[in-house]
Amino acid sequence: MFDQNYHEQKSEIHDPKWRRAILTVFHSTERARNVWENRCSNPALTPCQFVSCTDGTRDLIGVVIGGTMADAEDTRLWDLECAFTMLTEDAEILIVKGWYATAVEQVVEDITGGIEAMKSNEQTYRDDVLDLLVIKAGLAQQLDQSPAAKAFWDIHLERLGAAKWPEGPLPQCLVRFDERTGAKLGLVISGVWVERLGDWDMNEPFLVLSTDGEIQRCEGRVVEQVSVL
C-alpha cells in the first residue's frame, strides 16, 4: 500500500494515493475512529489534515485525528502547536507534542468526494470490527479470572468515577506486540491517562492483560514493537 521509503520523502503527504491509503487505514481501525468520534465536533466528517514532522527523535507522517481545535471554520482542523493525535500508516496512534515538533509540513484536503468510495469497503471494516469484538470478549473473561488485573482496572475506573468491573466498562485499548517471539494481543489496564484526550499516553509505561492471562509491563511506547488496534 505504501512506498517503503516514504519516511525519506517529506512530500509524501502531497501524494493523493498516499492520502487515500491512510484514510483506508483510518476507516479500518476502530481505535482511530473512536478517537476521532470523541474529539471531532462533527464525527460524521473524515480527517483531512495530513502532517509530516520531526518530534526530536524520529520522523513522523500521518493524518491528524484529534487534539486541540484550531481557530478555523473547518472543525476537522487541529492546532499543530499543541499536543495532537496522529494515525500512522501502520495503524499506530501517537500523541505528538506540537511544541517540540519541527520541520512541520501539512496538507489539508477537501475529501468529501472520496467518502462514497470509502463506504464501498464497509463490509471489510465491519468484519474487522467483529474480529476485534471476539478478541475483547475473550480478554473480558481473562480480566474476570485475574484478581490482580481487576485491581489495576478498578483503580482506573475509580479515577474516572465509573463503577467497578463488571458493572463498569471493559478496557478498550487493544495492542499487539509485533516484533516479539510469539506475538501477543492484550488490553491496556493501567498507565498514564490523558484526560483531555480520553486516551492512554502510549509514550509512558503501561500494563497490558494479554490473551494468555499474563500482566505485562511495557516501558513506554516502542513503535517497532507495539501496534494499537
Image (cartoon, rainbow, N blue to C red):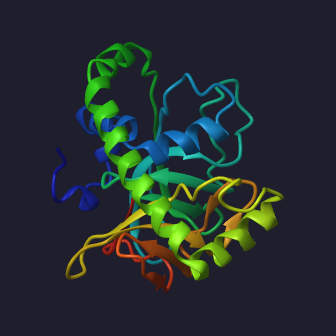
Q: Can residue 63 be seen in this view?
A: yes
Reply above or below: 152 against 103. below
> Which quadrant holds the N terminus?
top left
Please state which of residues 134 and 189 is positioned toward the viewer in this rendering: 134
Q: Position of residue 193 (x, y in %)?
A: 68, 67
Q: Where is residue 223 in the image (x, y as percent from the top left)?
A: 37, 71
At 51% from the left and 80% from the top, the residue drawn is 220
Reply above or below: 77 against 229. above
Q: Position of residue 163 (x, y in %)?
A: 78, 57
Residue 189 lies in quadrant:
bottom right
At 31% from the left and 45% from the top, the residue drawn is 131
Please state which of residues 116 and 9 is positioned toward the viewer in this rendering: 116
Reply above or below: 115 against 184. above
User: From the viewer's perspective, is 102 left or right of 226?
Assistant: right
Q: Can residue 55 be seen in this view?
A: no
Residue 9 lies in quadrant:
bottom left
Please state which of residues 143 and 18 is positioned toward the viewer in this rendering: 143
At 34% from the left and 31% from the top, the residue drawn is 126
Count numbered badges in the picture.
0
Q: Position of residue 6 (x, y in %)?
A: 23, 55
What residue occupies the far right of the structure in this picture? 161
User: From the viewer's perspective, is 216 left or right of 162?
Assistant: left
User: From the viewer's perspective, is 55 left or right of 59?
Assistant: right
At 71% from the left and 47% from the top, the residue drawn is 68
> Which quadrant holds the C terminus?
bottom left
Reply above or below: 198 against 157. above
User: From the viewer's perspective, is 188 left or right of 4?
Assistant: right
